[in-house]
Amino acid sequence: MVIKRMREMQGLSWPVRKQRMPRVPRPENNEHTAEKVRDKHKESFPDRKISSKRRELTETAEFLEDKRVPKKQRSALKVRDTFEDGAIADQWEEEMSVFMKMKSHRRRRNSDSKVTERISEQETCDSTVTYSCSPPSSRSSSNSSASTLKSDSSTGCRGRKRNVKVQNESECSKCHQCMRAERKNVVPCTNCKDKVYCLHCIRQWYPQLSEEVVRRKCPFCCRNCNCSICLHLSGLIKTSKREITHHEKVQHLHYLIESLLPFLKQICEVQRQEIEIEAKIQGIHPAAVEIPQTLCFSDERIYCNHCATSIVDLHRSCPKCSYELCLSCCQEIRQRCLLGRAEIKFQYVNRGSDYMHGGDPLTESCLPETYEDNVEALVQWNDNEDGSITCAPTELGGCGDCVLGLRRILPVDWISDLEVKAKNLFGECNTQIRSLTCKCSESGTSMLRRAASREGSNDNYLYCPASKEILQEEELLHFRKHWLKGEPIIVRDVLENTSGLSWEPLVIWRALCENVDSSTSSSMSEVKAIDCLAGCEVEINTRQFFEGYMEGRRYQNFWPEMLKLKDWPPSDRFEDLLPRHCDEFICALPFQEYCDPRAGILNLAVKFPQDVLKPDMGPKTYIAYGLAEELGRGDSVTKLHCDMSDAVNILTHTAEVTLTKEQQSAIEILKRKHKGQDERECLERQEVQKHPAEVLGAGSIDRKEWMNVSGISSLQEQEASENTSHQEQDASESTSQQEQFLEETGDALWDIFRREDIPELEEYLKKHSKEFRHTYCTPVKQVIHPIHDQSFYLTVEHKRKLKAEFGVEPWTFTQRLGEAVFIPAGCPHQVRNLKSCTKVAADFVSPENIHECLRLTEEFRKLPKNHRAREDKLEIKKMIIYAVEEAIRDLQHVMNFQID
C-alpha cells in the first residue's frame, strides 16, 4: 500500500517502506503514541515482507521546524535597505542588517512595554512603601519622619511619572514602520493620535499616499500598514463581505446535498458490487461478508499502487506484501482492459544557447546522451475464474503469490448510511431553490465582455460584473447560471473592497523573511526562477530578480529575458507565512460562498474534518515578468493545461517594462532568424519522411548541405504561392485582433477553451506538435497527452490555424489589475503576461463541476507513472463523502435552530 507524506510544497511524492499495523486507539494530544505503536509492531514482525507504504505529513512546514529549506523551497525575495536617501544596499549583508535591526527594535519595544507595565504597577502601590530616592536639599531637617516619608514617597512617584512621560514621548516620535526614533521628519496621525510615520517610509512603502492623507488617517488606522509587525497579524480585517441568513443557509445546504447525492450513490453502487463479488468468492450472502479494517491514521493518505488514485474506503490488499489496489483497477482487470501505465523515459537535449536564439545546434559529439521512447514491457494481469484477483506480478510491484483480500478504511456501512440520511433529510426539507433567468443582454454591455466571435454561438460574451454589483443574492444565482454552462467569469475592481494592503513583491518577501529564523533568511538571498526561453530552473540574486521585474532583463543579444516564480512562497502554509496578505486576498474574493478557502458554504474543499489531511488548495502567488509584444519564443506564459478543480485568479500588482529602440530592432532581427530556423527544421522533417535513409545516414555537416541542396528557397516559394490569396487577409485579421487587446489597458492575456472543443483541440496539437517548442527551445518530440503535458502555447498564428482547420476558437480576453478570473474545472487555458504581474490564485471545488473533477481524475490515473499530472492530489471522492456529511450536520443544526 502506498501512503505518502504529501509534500506538495516541494512537488515531490515517493513511496516509503512501512509495515502494516493492527488498529489501536490513539490517546488524544499525544503526538508520540503513533511512533511507539509502529516501533512495537516492527519488533513483533521483524521478518515480514512489506511494500511501498506510507509517509506522514508534519503539521507545520518542514523548513520552519528543522530550520532548513528543502531544495525546491529555497526561494525568496531580496529586500531593499532603508537608508535616509532611499538608496539600495549592494550587498546582502547590509540588507539583512536592516531586518536584524527591525527584529531588535521589536524586541526592544516589547521589553519597553513590559517596563512601563511594571512602573505603572509600582505607582499604584501603598504610600507606606519606602523609596530609595533622597529628599531635596532645600527641605528642613526639622521635619518629622512621617513628613519625610511622605515627601520621599511623593518625590519618587513624581520622578517615575516623569520617566514614563519621557518614554511615551520617545515612543510617539518613533516611526511605526521602521521603528527608528532618530527620524526627524515624521508625520503624526491625527486620527489615532498615537502612530507616526517618517517621510522616508511613506515615500518608500506608501508611494500612493501623500503626507496629508497619512496625517488625516495613517496606514495603521486604515488597516493597510505593511510594517513587519502588522504583516504578521491576522484578524485585523473582516474577510466575509456579507452575512448569510438562516434561510439562505438552508437553501445552500439543500442545493449542495441535491448536487452531491447522485455522486454519493455512484460510490455506494461500486462498493456494493465489490461486496457481491466478494460474497460470490466466499460462497455466502452479501450481508454476511465481514470486511477487515485497514489501519489508516488521520494524517495519512492511501493510494492505489497501480494507478496512484486516492483510496476512499473499500479496496483490495495483499496479506503478504500489502500491495493495495483500488476498485477501479479491480474492474479493469476483470474486464481485461487494465492499462500498463508503464514509465516512459524521455529527455530534451540542450543544444546550446545559440540554438535557442535561432542559430546552429551544438555538434552531436558535444550533446549529452538522451533516452527516448524507452517503454517498459507490458505485463499481463488477469483475474481468476471466481472473480478473485491475485497480487500484482513482481514487475508491477507486487509479489504475485497471494489473493488480494477486500479491506475497508471507514466504519462498516458508513457511506451507505450516509446516503440514507441524505435522502431522508432531502425529503424532509421542502426548500424551494430559487431560479433566475439570465438577463445579461438586457443589462447592457457593462456586465458583459466580448471574448470570442464564433458564428452561430450565444456564448461569445462573458459575464463580467463589477465587485460592487454582486453583493445581492440575485447576482449569486446569476453567477450560478453561467457557471453551470462551464463559462469563465470575470469580476472587476475586486481590490476596491479591501483595505489597500500593498501587494508589491518586495513587501511580500519582507513579510516572509520576518517570519522565518535568521539562518533561513540569510539563505534566501538567491531565488530559483523559471527561465521561460529554456523552460528550466535558474538561480538568481533576489534583488536582481525584482529589479528585472520592475525594469526588465535581457540577454547579451538584447532578446528579453523572461523569468517567473511559480507557487510562491514555496510552501503550502501561505496562511501561516503571510497571514495579513491571506486575509486581504480572501477579503477581495467575489462570490465567497463558492471560493472562500476557509468557510465557503458551497466550497467542497473546506468540508474536510479538522483531523483529516486536506489537499493543498492555495492561495499561491505567481510573480512573473511580462511584455506586451508576442515574442514567439521565451514569452512569459503559463502553457496550455487543465486544472483538476475550479480556480479563481486575482491580479494584484503590475509593472510595465518599456523596450528601447535598439532592443526593438534587435528583437525584429532575431524574430526573422527564428523564422528561418523554423523553416529549415520543417523542411528537414519533410525530407526525413521522404528520404529517411539518405538524410539520417549523413553526418551533421553533410545533412546541412543536403538541406541546402534540397532547396529551402523552393519551399518558401511554394508556401508563398499557396498562401498568396489568404495571407493579407489572415495577417490583417490576426494583427487587428492582437492590437485590439493591446490597445486595452490589459495586463495578462487569457485563452480559455470550451469543454466541448477539447477533442478538436487535442487533434490539432497532435497534428502540429512539431511546430511547437518546449524545453531548450527544442521541437516537441513526444506527446503523451496534448493538454496534460503542458508543452504547448498557442500563439496568435496557431489560434488562427486552429479556427481555420477545426472551427475552434477560445474565449480570449485581457485581465486588468484588480480583476478576478474564475476558471471552471475541465476548461483548458493558457496565459501570457503583457506586463510584469503578481497574481494570487486559489483552488476550490463547486458542486456544479464535480463531474469534471471526476472525469479529470479518471484521465490522470491513466497517464504514465512518471507523468507530472498523474498524482491524485484532489481526492474528489473523499471530498464528496465528507461534504455530504458536513452538509447534513449543518442543515440539521440550522433547521433545529429555526424550530426553536
Image: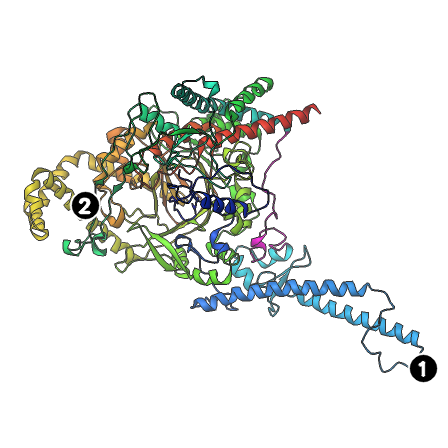
Q: Dot 1 surroundings within 10 Å: few (below 14), some, or many (20 or more)? A: few
Between 19 and 836, the one lying in front of the other is 19
- Residue 231 magenta-highlighted: yes
Could you tell me how far apart the alpha carbons at marks 1 and 2 are, in whole angstroms?
Answer: 108 Å
Specify the quadrant of the image occupied by residue 406: top left
For residue 240, say whether it is visible.
yes
Residue at screen point 58% across, 66% down: 104
- Residue 440 magenta-highlighted: no
Residue at screen point 71% across, 25% down: 900
- The residue wearing badge 1 is 142
Between 212 and 791, the one lying in front of the other is 791
Between 61 and 52, the one lying in front of the other is 52
Spot occupied by residue 124 in the image (x, y as percentages of width and height): 82, 63
Q: Is residue 384 above or below residue 119?
A: above
Residue at screen point 54% across, 50% down: 501
Secondary structure at numbered mark 2: helix
Between 828 and 675, the one lying in front of the other is 828
Majority secondary structure of magenta residues: loop
For residue 413, which numbered disc appears in the image? none
- The residue wearing badge 2 is 678
Secondary structure at numbered mark 1: loop
Q: Is residue 839 above or below residue 303?
A: below
Residue type indicated by callout 1: Ser
Position of the N terminus, as image quadrant, is top left
Q: Is residue 368 above or below residue 650?
A: below
Spot occupied by residue 168 in the image (x, y as percentages of width and height): 70, 65
Specify the quadrant of the image occupied by residue 462: top left
Q: Which residues are magenta?
A: 217-245
Residue type indicated by callout 2: Asp
Q: Dot 2 surroundings within 10 Å: few (below 14), some, or many (20 or more)? A: some
Viewed as shown, does residue 653 lie left or right of 33?
A: left
